[in-house]
Amino acid sequence: MTRTFPTGLAAASLIFAASSSADDLKIARTAVLNGTLPSSTNWQVDIQQGGSAAWISTGVVLPGRGIPITLRMDGLPGEAAFRFRRIDTAATLTPTLGAPAWHLSGTTAAEQPLAIQSSPDLNLWTPRELAYSGLDGRYVCALDALSAPRGFFRAQAPAVGIRDASAASHTPLPNYEGAAGFGPIYDDMPQLFKDGFVGALDPAEYHRDGKNAAAAGECYELAGPHGRTTVMITDTTTAPAGTVDAGRSFFDLGPNGFKVLSGGTTDGGFTAGVRLVPAPVTGNLKLFVVPGSNPYYTQLRPYNYRAGVDKVELLNNGATTWIDLPRTPFNTFVFQATTTPLAFPVAVRVTSRFGEVVTFPSIPSMADSQKITGSAQFTTFPDLAPVPEHRLRPVYHDAFTSVPGDIWSSGAYGGAAILAADGSLAYSGSASFRISSFANFAGVTFSNYPGFARPGNGMLKIVISSAAAIPAGQVGMWIHGSNTVGGPQVISPYVLLPALTSGWQVIRLPLEASGAPPIIWGFGISANTSGSLPNVWLDEMEFEVR
């Protein structure tokens, strides 16, 4: 479906090939609110649709910090009126409106990552980002202002080729060590290999489809919590539980690549989005003759290839039948004579994982450690998967997210008691998180290891209910983290919540406008009274990336 929405001199269109009649995605205007909220005050955003309609709360809350803020209301009608209303009084402030922005929102029949692209003319499409749905099944994705008089957006579903992975820090061995065997040709390898941007895969993926060393020399782009980089696969490693056995990939990364993704640390783990990419090689495909070879037993190791190698074949002088050379787990292709030894000149042909063939037509001899340069390089590579993004998983839905590299946990203080999975009440799913003995400024902190960069236009969302009414201002929240990776803890201003009831309320805390630190470690909720509060339940806790 295609929809066009003019905005003065610019127009935006969404083109989406629906995979089901239940798909419902659209582009709409976003209201951009500007204002300065006085320090030590607490506010919620109200919406009014139609000049005489009642004002209702959007569920967005934020603290006053005495500085100008800009707040995008993505996912809500851009033509509506908005206001800031004090949580603990009836005072209101009318924001000034910034230039209208755009957002994509809606649902699809099957929840899946959407690949967002833009184009000035419907011919050349440029990848922009990936969009993931929230726990409510809705996509809300902020779209940047258009730079041309007319532009178009396209959402493709599903975004194929994206892998979800956990990553750990590789034992800092020299680059030349590894099952792929590239050490003896270190000086002739691509620069990223020399720079230590290497990694290891678990055996199931390294020996893909049961083919020995199938992933050796391939390159993958990874997007981690603090950066993006490309690594070459040079080794294999054992994957920890909860990764490959749970349908996830596992990468053991060299220190240099790991630091780019982690923000500078060299140990620990994190999750990453991953896609296969062409290896950044220069020149033609090459062969290395492994030492110890002779006319009756010869080992060849291809290298400097743009796409992974699937097979190597050899043709003896005067022969008409190509010999398919078996591949060892250590990335060598072996000629072993049964009757006839090598008869020079020989021809060798190498087939990529995508079926392209490069031939070495006439090799007059083979000596130990000889490097042989072919006449061509692989050029065939399928359309790349969308640029990977680091995905923020939900904090809590029935249970805390707990995958290797992305683990959420909770801790009570001040006498509060918690039940991590209370099956007696849930907003969605089968359980919620219960806080009891909620009194005298007690509270709960929710922490993530290893933390993540604050997402642009992001929101912290919680769904909250109480056993009995709690007046406005008696429960509050904050976000904690640091200004830099590994820096000292920083805590955002405390924001008081509106009145709570036994009904479920969706609360959203805009991260940047609320003063959340650039690196987020977690958040907390506490009683803001010396008295006792009724039980409180939380559900569908997540950081929304918009």
Image: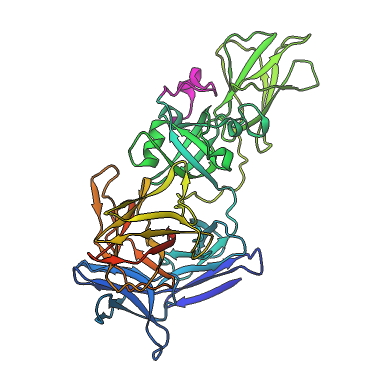
Q: Is residue 211 left or right of residue 136?
A: right
Q: How far across and how far down the image is residue 85, in percent?
A: 29, 78
Q: Which residues are magenta?
A: 173-191
Q: Is residue 406 left or right of residue 233?
A: left
Is residue 516 shown to the viewer in this render?
yes
Outermost residue on the bottom side: it is 52
Q: How far across and how far down the image is residue 107, in percent?
A: 56, 67
Q: How is the image coloured?
A: rainbow
Residue at screen point 34% across, 65% down: 509
Residue at screen point 81% across, 21% down: 320
353 and 477: which is toward the camera: 477
Quarter of the figure with residue 215 = top right
**Quadrant in the picture for the C terminus:** bottom left
Is residue 544 shown to the viewer in this render?
no
Residue 136 sits above or below residue 244 on the image: below
Q: How far across and how far down the image is residue 57, in percent?
A: 37, 77
The secondary structure that most of the magenta stretch takes on is loop
Residue 256 sits above or below residue 19 on the image: above
410 and 230: which is toward the camera: 410
Residue at screen point 70% across, 17% down: 346
Residue 347 in magenta stretch: no
Residue 264 sits above or below residue 4 on the image: above
